[in-house]
Every structure is written in C-alpha cells, then in structure tokens.
Image (cartoon, helix red, strand yellow):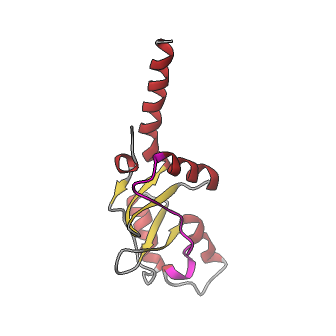
C-alpha cells in the first residue's frame, strides 16, 4: 500500500518569514512550483506562501517579507497518517499541495502531481480486480 513517505517530495524548498518577497518569488519561478512552506530556524512550519498570497502585493504595497503575506494557518499532515488524508485535504480545500510534518517539523510536501502515480496504481489494481471477478 502506498504511503505518504512513498509519494512526498522530501526536503522541499522552503523560506523563513523574514525572507524578502522578491527572493521567495524567484524561488517559485526557478523551481517551477506554486507555493513554499514557511519555517522557523528549527524547521517548524509557521505558514505557507502561495502564488495566490503573492497576488496580494498589488493591494498591499507595504508588504516586503514573506511574513507580510503568508498564510499563517498552514495545514499540515503527519507523515505517518494514511495517504487518503492527503487526498481528502487536497480535495476538500482545493489545495495544490499539502505540507507534511514529522514531530511538527517540515518533512516534505505532497502535490497533486505527486499523487498521480499512486492514483494510477489504484486504477490498475481495480482493473485487475474486475478481471478476476
């Protein structure tokens, strides 16, 4: 059975709340990702910065650092939870990614794209089960 550990991207690119917004945006563009976990010096999750958050630059012209725009109530799931928890979280919140923590510290990220191989495996399993019915 596929687990969160199997599908997550470990050691994701992250930023601290004091990072300049321009630097964070450069990371998004460089790595072709749509969001960044925001962590403190101990790698504890303190928020998330998404493309959507960055759109607020137009409305909040005094925003300079990640902490000014990040979503502070970042949703994260424990690394040992069932994979279905990640799927449910992405579906019910219309997220592109979910942060994965281990003992409160950032361990990885699971994006929609990361889930596709597990979905393919599930579809193949179901197809095989139907052949044997």
Range drawn in magenta: 67-83
Q: Can you say whether 26 is above or below 118 in the image? A: below
Q: Nearer the viewer, residue 16 or 124?
A: 124
Q: Residue furthest right?
A: 59
Residue 13, located in which quarter of the rendered image?
A: bottom left
Residue 98 percent location from the top left of the image: 49, 58
Q: Nearer the viewer, residue 64 or 120?
A: 120
Q: How many marks?
A: 0
Residue 41 percent location from the top left of the image: 35, 81
Q: Residue furthest left?
A: 11
Q: Can you say whether 100 is above or below 15 in the image? A: above
Task: Decide if residue 105 is on the left or right side of residue 96.
Answer: left
Task: Confirm whether the magenta stretch covers residue 81.
Answer: yes
Task: Confirm whether the magenta stretch covers residue 14.
Answer: no
The residue depicted at 39 percent of the width and 37 percent of the height is: 1
The residue depicted at 46 percent of the width and 81 percent of the height is: 17
Residue 93 percent location from the top left of the image: 62, 56
Residue 62 percent location from the top left of the image: 59, 87
The residue depicted at 42 percent of the width and 81 percent of the height is: 19
The residue depicted at 49 percent of the width and 60 percent of the height is: 34
Q: Residue furthest bottom?
A: 62
Task: Decide if residue 55 is on the left or right side of residue 133.
Answer: right
Q: Can you say whether 28 is above or below 92 in the image? A: below
């Amino acid at each position: 059975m596929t687990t969160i550990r199997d599908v997550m991207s470990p050691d994701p690119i992250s930023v601290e709340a004091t990072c300049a917004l321009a630097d964070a945006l450069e990371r998004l563009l460089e790595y072709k990702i749509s969001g960044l976990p925001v962590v403190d010096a101990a790698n504890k999750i303190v928020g998330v910065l998404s493309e959507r958050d960055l759109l607020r630059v137009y409305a909040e012209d005094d925003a300079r650092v990640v902490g000014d725009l990040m979503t502070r109530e970042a949703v994260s799931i424990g690394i040992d939870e069932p994979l279905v928890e990640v799927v449910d979280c992405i579906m019910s919140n219309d997220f592109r990614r979910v942060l994965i923590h281990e003992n409160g510290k950032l361990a990885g990220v699971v994006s929609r794209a990361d889930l596709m191989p597990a979905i393919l495996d599930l579809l193949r399993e179901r197809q095989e089960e139907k052949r044997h019915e």
